Structures are given as C-alpha cells and as structure tokens.
C-alpha cells in the first residue's frame, strides 16, 4: 500500500514542458481567429491605413496657415471643396484653403491637418473662419502611422484577441495560419465512480471530475473529449488510454482517488509502448498524487481524485502545458491580483501550498479571505474567487500580508 | 453638420440597463453548462457526498480509542476488515477496532475518523499499531459536509464556472435550466467601408470593426451574427436593422465614422416602429459618438466608427448590457488590477477618460505604462493590456499614482 517515490517540486514539473511540442497548424478564416494562436508571423502587405485620413469632423488645411489663429484673431480660409466619405479628393489644397471633411475621410494632397468643426465658424458657402491653430498631422492619421509595409505586426505564437483579429482583417488577411485547437481526452477511473444520471449507492460517488475538468479545458479554449468511466481494470484502462492517445493531443485520467486506482494508472502507463513516467508525486498541496507520463510525444496526466485537488492541479500545472500545446509563446498575460490577507495561514515547508480565497473589496482595498474547508469539499471551490500560492520555504503568512491571487 | 444634443455620463448610460430584460431560458445538458448562467435556483436533492468518506488512505477507527497514542506509546488495534472502494462495509466498528480504507472509501458504522497510513505500522494480518491520535471527523468528510439536502447550492443568475458545472453534475442534475446564449447582430455601415477581401482604393477602409466586435462578443461567450456592410442608404439600413432585430437579441451598428453615417443611423432608428433613442452622445473618451436606442424590447447601439473608440465602448458599456441580457445577477467578479502609473496623464474635466496601458512587472511591482497614439490607431490596442479609467472630476493623474486597470 505504501509508495515511496521522489516527489518533484512544482518548478521541476513545469520545466518538463520542454519535453513536448505544439500541435500542428492549419489555415483558418480570420472570422474564426478569436482565441486562436498565430502559427506564423503576420507581415503588413501595405501601409495601414494607407492614406492620410481625418480623425475629426472639420476642415482639412495646411497647418502653417492656421498658426496664430485664435478666438480674438481668427484665420480666414477659402472653402474649395467637400470631401465625401470614401472618395479620393480630385483637387489639391494650397495654404489659405480649406476642404470640408468628415472623420475617416481622405485628406486632399497638400493638406496636413484637420481643424475641428467646433473651432470654426462658417461665413458663407465659400469661406470659413478658424479660431484655433493646428500642428502638422493634428487630427489626422498618416498613411503608415498604424503600420508600415513589411512591418511584422503580429508574431508567431501570439494569442489572437478581438483587436488582433481586427488588425488581421484590416490588413486584408481573409485567412491566417493558426495552431490547431488541442483536443484533450478525459478518462474517469475508479470502481466507486458512477455516471451522474445514476443514484449513488452508499460508497459510490458521481463522476464530478470529468465535468469540472471539461469546463476548465473549455475555459482554456481547447476541446474536451470524454471517454466515460473505466473501472479499476488494467486491460480496460490501457485500451481507453490508447484510444484517447490516438484521438487527442493530451490525456487526463481522473476520478478514482484510491491507491488502487493510482496503481492501475501507473501500471497501465508503464505498460504502454514508448511511454515514460516523468512525474509520480508532486510537492504541491492539494495535488500531491499527480502523475505525468510521456506517451509517444503526448502528455498523459494522472490527476488526484479529490475534486479540489484535481482542479488546483489542472489550473496550476496542466493549463501551462496546454498553452504550450496550443502554440502560445508570448509573455504571460495571466496577471495575479494583489490583495490583503484577512487571517494567518500556515503552510508546510518544502511544499507549495495553494489556498482557496474569496476576494472582497472593502474601503477601496481588496481583501483575500481564506475559504475554510477540506479539499474534498467542492463548495470550497464554489465559494472561492482565486488561489493564493505559498512558497516552498515559507511556513505561513501573517494576517495583513499583501499577497498575489491567481483568479479562478 | 453640427449636432447639439445633451450627452449622457457613463453612469447615466449604464443605468439604462434597467430598460431591458434577460433573454429567455432553456433546458440544457449539464455537460454544456460551462459559461452559461443558471436560470433557476439549484437545490440539493440529497446530502452530498451522502456518506461518511475517507479523505486519506489509512485505517477507519473510533477516534476516542486513539487518544493518547504516540510514537513512544502506540495504540494497538484489531483489524476487522478491508473496505473496498465503492463498497458498503458489512460490519460495524467498535472501539479498539480498525478497518483498512482508501481515500474515498465509505467508513463503517461506528467509525468517525481515519488514521493516515503513514502513522501506522502493521503488526500482522490482524493487528496494527497507531502512532498518532485523531480527532472526531479527522481525515473524513461527513455525509452532508459539502451540502445538505434542500440547501440552495447555486442561485439563479450564477455564472457556471467549471466548479459549478461539477457541482451540478455531482448532485445528479443531468440537465439544468439556463438562460439562452444571446445573439448579437453586427451591421457595418458607411460608404467608405469595404469587405476585407477587397483592395482598398484611397479613401476606403476595410471592415475592421465587425471583426473586433465579433471577437469581443465571443470573448463574452455570446454569439455574434454578421449582417455585412450597408452603404449610407436609409432604406437599406432600415431593412438591415429590422432583419437583425428579428433574428438577434441586441444589435450593433458600426463602421462608418462620418457625421453622415451617424445621421443615417439616427434617422433609421427614429423611423423604426416602437423605437426610442435613449442615448445620443456620451461623455466618455474615446467613445463620445455613441448611440443607444430601444427598439421594441431590444437594445440597438450605434458605436463610434474609430476602431479604438468602438472597442472601448464595447468593453466598458455594451458588455455590461450583454451580461444583463445573459441573465447574470451575481456580484461583479471582474476584478481591476492595481498598478503604478509610469507617467503623468491628463484628462478633461466632465468627461470619463479611458487610457490604454501596457502592464509590466518590475521589482515585484506592476507598472501601468500609458500607450501613446491616436485613438484611430489599432496598434494602440494591440500593445495594450488594459484600460485605465479616469473620473469625470479629475484633471489628470500624476506619475507614481496607484491606479486600477481593467484588463483587455
């Protein structure tokens, strides 16, 4: 019943990301690009916006003609035309001349700025007074001011947020090269686990974990694939893992929390061809009984059976691996939230602890309130807004300490 | 060309949420519940977990029999059985007796705690020594410790995160009542807007906004529906809005930034049956030329044409409306990130300013660096991680001020 193996630190486990590589890429329509990862650099094929455009409604002018203009001493301009939206002005502008223009309109040749309509007064159909001077390029965007031709506007490995999707569209990329969306297989294991539609006899428990895990996979914008519940049977478990490895990019085993189930997991993984156990135990609480194997080129995780432990391990350890599989290369945008701890918390040395906390704003200060309760209780995660990480060499943190919270 | 209308403050615009109601609800499988909003309270039909289970591998005991046990003076227990995973123990436990149990196993009647295997030493097949005392309920979860029968475990209006999905599954809800996913119609307007596949002639600009807006709608876990580009033509615009109102729950008009296009938007909305203009201008920068109408029971937005303005208005104003349509009622979980401002920023009084910032960690302090550049430049949003909100009555903020950042 006892297993003595060398547990790995969180950093040791995370460093094993280098054992794996991103999934392949594919060409997708830019309208489907949101939340995907760029698989090749995006180079501007032309200047953007490509012409000098107004950013205000008003009059296009040669800025030098406005210098010195003020309320008390307005400058007088001849109106030489009106620029319609989306049209190329068919005239040039000379000093002392103005052309009516709308936001987004193209400036005529010669014009280098726009005077806001609020700073003008129409005299008649042919003349306008200007009350305020403008600097060169004021209230305009120049032809290559957003991006110049041949600029690398987005690099491989970038997460495509709404603004990146818009930029790609604006540069005329109807299709882009993106990493495929990883598929993650989820296998529930353990004799005590029953489908959620069944009434649990005493000693049985519904298959909670495959639902929470699938939720986290969706939250990470990947695709969960469920393989149902496998009893503690070596042949059946091996068959399920093989099938999941064939069809997905990463496999999660979860559900059973007994030593027996964990033994089956290790036995099944050890007997798969071309498979190496990389992690068998991790000095993280909750989350110690975590297993990681490399099967062929794919990661297979044996997650703790306790529902909260499984969630913490998924969030803290598995998601970074998933992000690498997705092709994400850019700086980590996952920001931690500073908050003030409302009570003392203790922690074991030589172990990374993750404490569930509730966040509350009081007097303009964010408070982190530890959520009490055993790690087998799902309600502790329901009440929690985030996780507080406590370092390996810290015995605990005192009430009032400013801590950084990982949002849940 | 001039429009004088009373602009509304951000708070006045947000308070108009009360004019609208959530979309209807539907019954969905719990495996599809992630990111949905509960449309009715979830009541525990039974205790959870429903039986007294072990949270450690070890021996189930009557805790009082262990009192006083220590390394130097172990307590001697008779092993009366082994509890297999998922089975109901067919024996009761008396003081001085122990039963081998695995994490997740059901305690026999009489047992109130579990001694961890690490604190025991097997003597022979029938006896075990225990080196550490346990308290009642130590290393176990009691039958109703997670949730008791009839508890309201999740209330109507709750966002279903992975843990809420798992909880619903664990309580046996194969299906739940959730609000429908709102559909958001997007109509691009303006003579200067062309499809992204076309090469823009000078003065024309590709339809960037409908892509960024669709991305934000997807980010908010709703469904964007595109209605293409409509030229500045009142009949065509009215027809497009009518069609979008028939098929979606909220409509966004965006693209053209000219006064002409805005006039068409107002004219089209004003001439729709049962339609009222609620907002025509908002004292927010960027984002002033924002229009909100109530058409029947649905919100219709005229967004600014400038790409950055449209994004800011969507993020700051439209998404809260969308969350209400989704049925979200719980406390606002959108946390702002405290960071230190790296330079002075100025702001106009009587206006809410949103400054794009880049976040950078330096010496354990998060820095907010304002991203310079005009609001027509999409690259300012590409470089930005967040938005800094500056109040109506603030003239500016000094370098070094601790500010709260809205993540982008």
Image: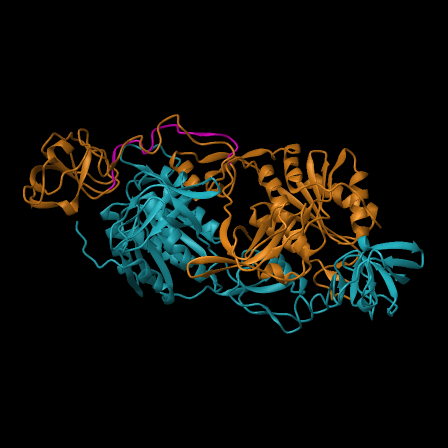
Chain colours: A cyan, B orange
Asked if the magenta segment contains residue B93, the reply would be: no
Left/right placement of residue B204 relative to residue B167 reads right
Q: Is residue B327 left or right of residue A235?
A: right
Is B44 inside the magenta-drawn segment? yes
Q: Would you identify the image quadrant in which residue B64 lies?
A: top left
Tell which of A251 and B384 is nearer to you: B384
Residue lying farthest to the top in this orientation:
B150
Dominant SS in magenta: loop
Q: x and y percent of residue B374 in the render?
A: 67, 60
Is B313 in front, or is A374? B313
Q: Position of residue A181 (x, y in %)?
A: 50, 58
Nearer to me, B153 or A33? B153
Indicate whether A272 appears above or below B47. Answer: below
Q: Which residues are magenta?
A: B38-55
> In the orientation shown, which residue stands out farthest toward the front?
A72
Number of marks in the image?
0
Q: Residue A33's spot in the image, x, y percent? A: 58, 58
């Amino acid at each position: 019943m006892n297993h003595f193996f060398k547990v790995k630190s969180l950093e040791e486990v995370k460093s094993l990301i280098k054992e794996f590589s991103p999934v392949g890429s594919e060409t997708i329509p830019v309208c489907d690009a949101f939340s995907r990862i760029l698989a090749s650099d995006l180079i501007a094929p032309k200047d953007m916006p490509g012409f000098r455009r107004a950013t205000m409604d008003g009059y296009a002018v040669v800025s030098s003609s406005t210098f010195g203009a003020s309320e008390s001493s307005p400058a007088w301009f001849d109106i030489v035309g009106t620029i319609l939206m989306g049209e190329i002005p068919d005239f040039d502008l000379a000093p002392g001349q103005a052309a009516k223009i709308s936001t987004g309109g193209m400036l005529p040749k010669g014009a280098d700025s726009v005077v806001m309509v609020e700073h003008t007064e129409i005299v008649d159909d042919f003349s306008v007074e200007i009350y305020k001077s403008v600097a060169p390029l004021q209230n305009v965007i120049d032809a290559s001011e957003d991006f110049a031709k041949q600029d690398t506007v987005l690099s491989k490995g970038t997460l495509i947020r709404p603004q990146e999707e818009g930029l790609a569209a604006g540069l005329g990329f109807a299709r882009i090269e993106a990493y495929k969306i990883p598929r993650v297989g989820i296998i529930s294991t353990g004799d005590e686990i029953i489908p959620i539609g069944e009434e649990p006899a005493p000693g049985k428990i519904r298959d909670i974990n495959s639902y929470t895990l699938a939720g986290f996979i969706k939250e990470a914008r990947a695709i969960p694939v469920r393989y149902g519940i496998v009893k503690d049977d070596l042949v059946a478990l091996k068959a399920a893992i093989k099938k999941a490895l064939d069809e997905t990019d990463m496999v999660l085993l979860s559900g059973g929390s007994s030593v027996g189930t964990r033994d089956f997991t290790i036995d099944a993984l050890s007997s798969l061809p071309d498979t190496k156990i990389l992690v068998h135990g991790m000095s993280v609480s909750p989350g110690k009984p975590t297993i990681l194997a490399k099967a062929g080129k794919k990661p297979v995780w044996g997650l703790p059976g306790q529902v909260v432990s499984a969630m913490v391990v998924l969030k803290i350890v598995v998601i970074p691996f998933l992000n690498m599989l997705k092709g994400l290369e850019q700086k980590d945008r996952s920001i931690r939230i500073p908050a003030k701890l409302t009570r003392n918390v203790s922690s074991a040395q030589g172990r990374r602890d993750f404490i569930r906390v509730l966040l509350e704003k009081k007097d303009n200060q964010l408070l982190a309130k530890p959520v009490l309760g055993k790690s087998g209780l799902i309600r502790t995660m329901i009440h929690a807004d985030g996780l507080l990480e406590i370092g390996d060499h810290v015995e605990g943190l005192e009430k009032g300490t400013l801590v950084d919270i990982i949002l849940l």
